[in-house]
Amino acid sequence: LEDAVRRRSRHAVGIHAGDPGKPPTMAGLSRWLGAATLVEMVDDGGLLRAVVVKAGRAVLRRLSPAAEVHAELDHLRSSLRRLAFRHGSPASLAASEKAAAYGASRLDDLLLGPLAGDIGDGTLVVVPTGPLHAVPWSVLPSCAGRPVTVSPSATLWLKARSTSEAPPARPTVLVAGPGLAHATAEVRALGRSYRGAKSLTGRRATCAAVSAALDGAALAHVAAHGHFRADNPLFSSLELADGPLTVYDLEALHHTPRLLVLSACDSGVSDVRPGDELMGLAAAVLSLGTRVLVASTMPVPDDETRTLMIALHSELRAGLTPATALARAQSRLSARSRPAGAGFVCIGAGHRGLRG
């Protein structure tokens, strides 16, 4: 069946992809950035460089050797994973805490240290390159408490930021998939805060029912296992009551949710193909019209994730932008829970409010 889908997709005309748009101009970027700073990273023959756009001006900066950055990133993610799931003895966990703190500081020095004089302490829009799409930005000292938005490209960010048309408002959608001990409780807790929300849990959370509910929603929250398929990222999926909801299924929606929160492991993971093209759930929903995606680039324990998600939605209901809401929610976590929340990133036009 997957082979058949692959063959058909190679000949299908994209319904939603349309014109990806021309590369943004400096005037266009500056207009929509406002006081925010955009940092686009590139791998120049093994040396990382960054183009920094701020206040109508662009500068090119030299960062660090890519191999050194990638090695530090691997060590940091490994330490955070052990801490999130509390793997090991108290002594080994203490060692992991020190390793994570050192790794975060070192990665910060390599990636953002050379840009300290350019980026200030305001809102940051980051366009990573290659493996840097998996950076847990919130744990880097320069990003602590700072609204950070990640985007696959400056063009996609500008499209999400500047698009004004929106589908008719539909109820908030809350979904709990199978196999997560706290998913249903998470959805029920959120349901008490969103009047008129459509909740789908248990056997009701089928692929057809969830797809229909997601179509045109202003806000959707899905607590489900995420599966990233490296062999074919378009088969990456969310696990629902009757099977996987894949990227191919999402392509059938007329309007993907304006803000989509995926409370699931690895839901923000993407495969980087030649040309720095991203493939996976995150890249798909952004290209299909979702303006903001909150998702995790790492495995996360569902009980700790529930605490983060409730805090995130509390900040969203207070009127904060998604990037600011996520930063506030992550900073509110206890020291024990913080590694579990570190993997969540705000992707797209994260410093744009839902009504903007």
Image (cartoon, helix red, strand yellow):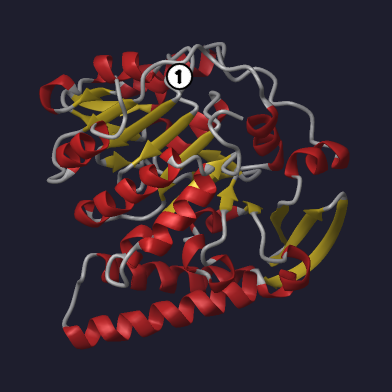
Can residue 300 be seen?
Answer: yes
Image quadrant in which the N terminus is located: top left
Q: Is residue 111 above or below residue 7?
A: below
Relative placement, left or right, of 45 versus 337 is right
Q: Residue at x 35, y 27 (%)?
A: 246
- List the residue tagged with mark 1: 251
Mark 1 residue crowding within 10 angstroms, few (<14) / some (14–19) / many (20+): some
- Residue 198, position in %: x, y? 27, 21
Q: Is residue 64 above or below residue 211?
A: below
Q: Residue at x 65, y 69 (%)?
A: 112
Relative placement, left or right, of 108 versus 325 is right
Quadrant in the rendering for residue 61: bottom right
- Residue 250, position in %: x, y? 41, 22
Pick the residue in front: 9 or 236: 236
Q: Residue at x 36, y 58 (%)?
A: 341
Quadrant in the rendering for residue 244: top left
Pick the residue in front: 325 or 344: 325
- Residue 293, position in %: x, y? 47, 38
Q: Residue at x 53, y 68 (%)?
A: 70
Quadrant in the rendering for residue 85: bottom left
Image quadrant in which the C terminus is located: top right
Pick the residue in front: 134 or 67: 134
Q: Amino acid at mark 1?
A: Glu
Q: Is residue 256 above or below residue 145?
A: above
- Residue 20, position in %: x, y? 69, 26
Q: Secondary structure at mark 1?
A: loop
Can residue 280 be seen?
Answer: no
Number of numbered discs present? 1
